[in-house]
Image: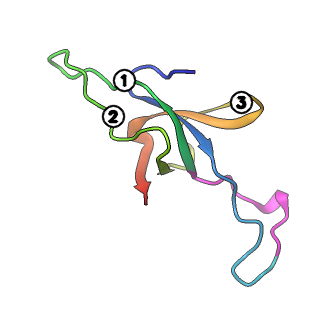
Amino acid sequence: MKPLNDRVLVKRLESEEKTAGGLFIPDAAKEKPSKGEVVACGPGKLNEKGERVAMEVKPGDVVLFAKYAGTEIKVNGADHIIMREEDILAILD
């Protein structure tokens, strides 16, 4: 799958199974993680002059994104999100 323009395909990373104190979190109480790994990127969007602006993220980057960003899809049975690059808040080291 290759996203178009400034869209990014992100695979959600699994959330923590237990708290810092060692308590296990049941599935019903877990929030969807807002951290994921970039799987694929589009070529970037066009500026006013018609020039392509390169993406700042690349496949393999671990990113932090807005809680309700993008559209959830399933790819090969795994949950992914397709979103615009502007919905990504940060690249994590």
Q: Position of residue 74 (x, y in %)?
A: 71, 30
Q: Are marks 1 and 2 in contact (CB under 8 Å)?
A: yes
What residue is shown at x 69% (from left), y 54% (from top)? 14
The answer, for residue 69, to whether it is visible in the render is: no
Residue 43 - label: 1
Q: Is residue 84 magenta?
A: no
Residue 58 - label: none
Q: Secondary structure at mark 1?
A: loop
What residue is shown at x 63% (from left), y 54% (from top)? 33
Crowd band around label 1 with a 10 angstrom C-alpha radius: few (<14), some (14–19), many (20+): some
Instruction: Tell me where residue 28 sits by quadrant.
Output: bottom right
Residue range (magenta): 24-35
Which image quadrant: the C terminus? bottom left
Q: Are marks 2 and 3 in contact (CB under 8 Å)?
A: no
Left/right placement of residue 77 relative to residue 72 reads: right
- Residue type at numbered disc 1: Pro
Q: Which residue is mark 2?
A: 55
Q: Position of residue 53 (x, y in %)?
A: 25, 28
- Residue type at numbered disc 2: Met
Q: Secondary structure at mark 3?
A: strand
Q: Secondary structure at mark 2?
A: loop
Crowd band around label 2 with a 10 angstrom C-alpha radius: few (<14), some (14–19), many (20+): some
Left/right placement of residue 37 relative to residue 27 reads: left
Q: Which residue is mark 3?
A: 74
What residue is shown at x 83% (from left), y 73% (from top)? 24
